[in-house]
Amino acid sequence: MTNTSGVARLRNFIKQVTSCAESVGDTDSEAFVDFCRAQLVDLIAKDDWLPEEFAAPHPEHYQQYLLHCDPLERFSLISFVWGPGQKTPIHNHGTWGLIGMLRGSEISQAYEVAEQEPGLIPARHEVLNPGDIAFVSPEAGDIHEVINAFDDRVSISIHLYGANIGLAERFVYEPASGRSRPFVSGYSSSLTPNIWGLSV
Ligand code: FE
């Protein structure tokens, strides 16, 4: 565990992951993802660093605040903020993603595309609690929906993806037919947060 607190923990995470991306080279490699997972475990071990601007729920839909995008778009870090009962559509990612639960609890329901008939088949059902990490990737299972496990409070998870996920072209799915349509998520924040100017 690093000996930092507040937003310095976030800055330290970004420095560590950026340094590793430089030394490993291939940011789709198992070595890089394993390093990122360990760093994310460290980051979410304490809930004392996420600036409140990036922890604010929206009354009608979940928020995805960009915390940092690597200048070479090798990875991006986002805080997902779920209001009570809010959930995503069923979607894929097209790249690897690590999901670390910071506050509250969320449910990740995975789906597989049925081969014999139209429609999606429910697969792995995971409940994430603070400190837990989930992983998605095109190889390990890439289609899921995410639901706030609570209908009376906010939940927040921190996501690290192997791309600039807000601009990535991916898909949302209709479960009964299995039909997909293209989707670009964007980010809730229109400006990259200036985490470098926040005092610790
Ligand atoms: Fe997802």
Image (cartoon, grey):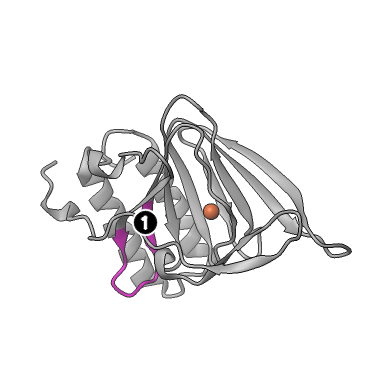
Give the residue at the far front of this rendering. 60
Toward the right, the furthest residue is 116
92 on left or right of 68: right
User: Taking 75 as reference, is 72 above or below it?
Assistant: below
Q: In which quarter of the image is residue 112?
A: bottom right
Left or right side of 184 for 77: left
The quadrant of the image that shows the C terminus is top left
**Which of these two is toward me, 122 or 30?**
122
Which residue is found at the position 49% from the left and 53% from the top?
Answer: 98
Give the residue type that dot 1 points to: Leu
Residue drawn where x is 58% and y is 56% of the image: 136
List x then y, in percent, for residue 134.
55, 47
Q: How crowded is mark 1: few (under 14 residues within 10 Å), some or many (20 or more)?
A: many
Q: Does the residue labelled 1 lie within 8 Å of ligand 1?
A: no
Report x, y in % for residue 50.
28, 41
Residue 33 lies left or right of residue 125; in this view the side is left
Residue 43 lies left or right of residue 194; in this view the side is right
Which of the two residues, 125 or 12, is positioned nearer the viewer here?
125
139 over 81 or under it: above or below: below
Residue farthest top in this picture: 152
Residue 127 position within the rendered picture, expressed as x and y whole percent measured from the top left: 59, 35
Disc 1 on helix, strand or loop?
Answer: strand
**Residue numbers of the magenta segment:** 68-78
Q: Identify the image quadrant of residue 178.
A: bottom right
- Could you tell me which residue is drawn at 44 percent across and 49 percent down? 38
Whether residue 40 appears in magenta in the rendering, the answer is: no
Q: Is residue 120 above or below residue 157?
A: below
Q: How many labels does the image show?
A: 1
Q: Name the residue under label 1.
A: 77
Q: Estimate the x, y position of residue 1 in percent, counting from the top left.
A: 34, 40
